[in-house]
Amino acid sequence: MRSDDAPERWRRGRGVPVPDVNVSFAQNGEDIVLWRALGKIENGVYLDVGANDPTDDSVTRKFYDAGWSGIAVEPNPTYAAEFREQRPRDTVFEAVASDSTDETMELHLIEGTGLSTLIDDISADHQESGFVVRNIEVPVISLNHAIEQAGLADRDLHFLSIDTEGAEAQVLASIDFTRFRPWVLVIEATAPMSTRQVHGSWDSIVDGAGYEFCFFDGLSRYYVAAERSAELKPDLEYPAGILDAYVNVRQLRVQEELAETKAELADTAERLWHASERLAEVAADLEARTRELAESRAHEAELGQLVADLQGTVSWRITKPLRGVRSLRNGGS
């Protein structure tokens, strides 16, 4: 099932489903380009190396929501734990992918970012820019071993995404391309936080493995296996654009929050309207009671005046002794 046919599979903490739109989670529309070429495939398989967050800036989230699954190689303990929680169909390796024979390697960890790296010089640059770097030892796994452990050795591997902040060559050297043939490769090809292209350090590996270059989107380079070129390359030669009719998930969240705010404002306005109605009823009731009280006081004053007028009459004064005698008699009885 296509991800844009199953929008309610996606949740982002607040339990709000994605509307029926073509959603991109990736930072530069990579998932839209891949979806254009591979979206027709059901239950596909991806390899996500340097996976980072399971949703934000994820190249594979869109495909996971469409029923795909695969491998996530992510050394950051926080992101790896979030992957296990949010994407249970994926096989998560809390490690770095490398051809190194060492059991562990030092990761320069920058929490809350996608900037963690194995490369000392890159880490030093980040520290100079004000980032807090913490060094941790993490396990090493080759992509060959990861594919085997995940039980995917006999499956079609539809795409491999690599975003490892300068360690791309190590990742590529860890997979036997004569044995495992991802149909499409998407590899970050610029130095971290810059537009300087660095694919020269690993492009020969890809070319030698029988992959054809498709295009560069300003951040990543796309390649297609030569045996899949005729089928897939036409859809992989240009970036995500207006004709893909997609929306970035961050924009979607803003729209959702705006819609929620509008709904809250409408609810508040309705409650205020009902309150004003009730206030008008109370005011009308108060006015009626005030009028009744004024009428009562006026009547009381009128009676008082009548009594005063009566007491001022001649007959009242003449009969005063008789009233006194009657009062004594009544008191004495």
Image (spheres, helix red, strand yellow):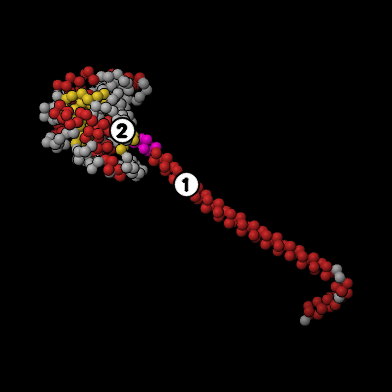
**Where are the magenta residues, as a range?**
249-254
How many marks on residues?
Answer: 2
Asked whether residue 100 is in view, the answer is no
Image location (x, y in percent) of residue 102:
17, 25
Residue at left 83%, top 67%? 309
Residue at left 17%, top 25%? 211
Screen quadrant of the C terminus: bottom right
Q: Which residue is mark 1?
A: 266
Mark number displayed over residue 189: none
197 left or right, relative to 229: right
- Packing grade of label 1 (10 A; few <14, some 14-19, many >=20) is few
Question: Is residue 63 located in the magenta-colored stretch of the structure?
Answer: no
Counting residues from the start of the chain, the first of labels 1 and 2 encountered is 2
Q: Dot 2 lies on which element? A: helix
Q: Nearer the viewer, residue 81 or 231?
A: 231
Q: CA distance from mark 1 to mark 2?
A: 35 Å
Residue sticking out furthest to the bottom: 333
Amino acid on which the number 2 mark rests in the picture: Leu
| Callout 1 touching callout 2 (CB < 8 Å) | no
Picture quadrant of residue 105: top left
Amino acid on which the number 1 mark rests in the picture: Ala
**In terms of secondary structure, what is the magenta stretch mainly?**
helix
Q: Which residue is mark 2?
A: 243
Q: Dot 1 lies on which element? A: helix
Image location (x, y in percent) of residue 245:
32, 35
